[in-house]
Amino acid sequence: MEAHISAFALLLALLIVAAKASAWLSLRLRQPAILGELIAGLILGPSLLNVFSWPLFHHQEFQGMVIALGELGVLFLMGMAGLEIELEEFLKARRVALLAGTAGVGIPLLLGTLIAYPFHRDLPTSIFMGLVLSATSVSVSAQTLLELGRLRSPEGIALLGAAVVDDILALVALAVFTGIVNPGGGAGGGAGGILLALARMMLFLILSFLLARAVLPRIATWVQNQPISEGLIALAFVAILALAGAAEELGGLAAITGAFLAGLGLGDHPARHTIFERLRPAAYGFFVPLFLVGVGLRADLRTMSLEGALFTLALIAVAIVSKILGCGAGAWLGGFRPLQAWRLGLGMISRGEVGLILASLGLSAGFLQPYEFVAVVAMVVATTLITPILLRWAFRTPKPGSAPLQKAV
């Protein structure tokens, strides 16, 4: 057993070094860090080096342990996403954000389902693929706009607000889907079972949100005043883990929904930024790199057939077009000029971590096959690469009177 622990410790060290070194190289090449971490996983995974087949790491349980640690990283990532939500920023552009975010979920969900069905002939799998396409991750876009001095522009503010709407609607859609569809592909319990599952989910969502916003900040204030070592951060970990577990066991929801709600609740506390910054080292120094590398470790490019390659290309095309159409049309209906709506649509293309989280959940639950998972990973890489290029092109004409921010972080 001790030999296994030492070998697993060496494996974790290797994976984290590979993730951070690849992230550093990616940033040096002016690409997002997530791209380097994904590629590191692909290189170390069954597609190339297959690290789990090396004699030192050839233990049956090692891959499952790495995946479990990575899934904890997903929960902390979603909790931190909830902490980051600024309701004030959302209210500045609420009409555009609501319409762009809603259409930015609906159109990709519809088009993703339609493009996937001819390949799979399985409606639950096709709908889940549409759900993956409905997600968005604006961290890459926000960083690009920050570098261009446009994050405080109308497009930048609306982008952040639309991302909040997109995240919430995508999570609700995922919760509904996982609550009423069995991994085998059938709906659970007929119409009565579906309605009961929906009622259970909505009740849990409403009660959890109200309790998180009303109770968690008060508990955090009390803990902050007690002589407990790192009490506030311990509370954050407990809240994220407890609500994540409760969401799945009691509410029939995805665990990430509960983690997100915990972050929303703690986000109402005055020390929210302190909590975020104290969670960040553990999340981004250990758990999240294991999740991102773990995605690559689970993707086997050798499973890709000609049909799979065609599906991947179609998925990438729909991923790009559906966000431009959905978010752009929603922004235009919300009052943006065509150029502004075009820019907002481009900024919502990247799927990033959120798309990978949904794909990992789909693979674990049996909604996606290995080659479909590879297609999603390829889509995430492609959209992450193309979004900054398209945004820089769309903002190539300087905006009169725009003042760049002091520093890009």
Image (cartoon, helix red, strand yellow):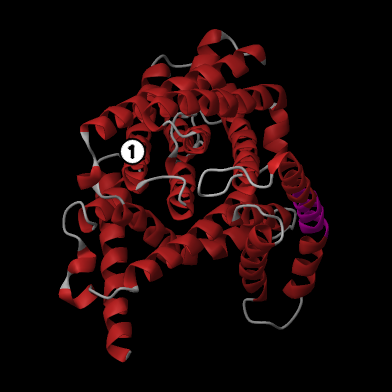
Left or right: residue 260 versus residue 109 is right
Residue 373 position, x and y percent, is 36, 44
**Magenta-colored stretch includes residue 261:** no
Residue density around tag 1, few if under 14, some if 14–19, many if 20 or more, within 10 Å: many
Please tell me whether the stretch drawn in magenta is mainly helix, strand or loop. Answer: helix
Measuring 47% from the left and 29% from the top, which residue is drawn there? 149
Left or right: residue 62 versus residue 52 is right
Measuring 63% from the left and 50% from the top, which residue is drawn there? 82
Residue 222 position, x and y percent, is 79, 72
Looking at the image, the residue that sits furthest to the front is 190
Measuring 58% from the left and 49% from the top, which residue is drawn there? 81
What residue range appears in magenta?
204-214
Left or right: residue 19 versus residue 196 is left
Q: Quadrant of the N terminus?
A: bottom left
Residue 3 visible at all: yes
SS at mark 1? helix
From the image, tell me which residue sits under label 1. Answer: 375
User: Looking at this view, is 406 or 377 the one in front?
Assistant: 377
Residue 340 position, x and y percent, is 54, 15
Q: Quadrant of the C terminus?
A: top left
Q: Is residue 356 above or below residue 20?
A: above
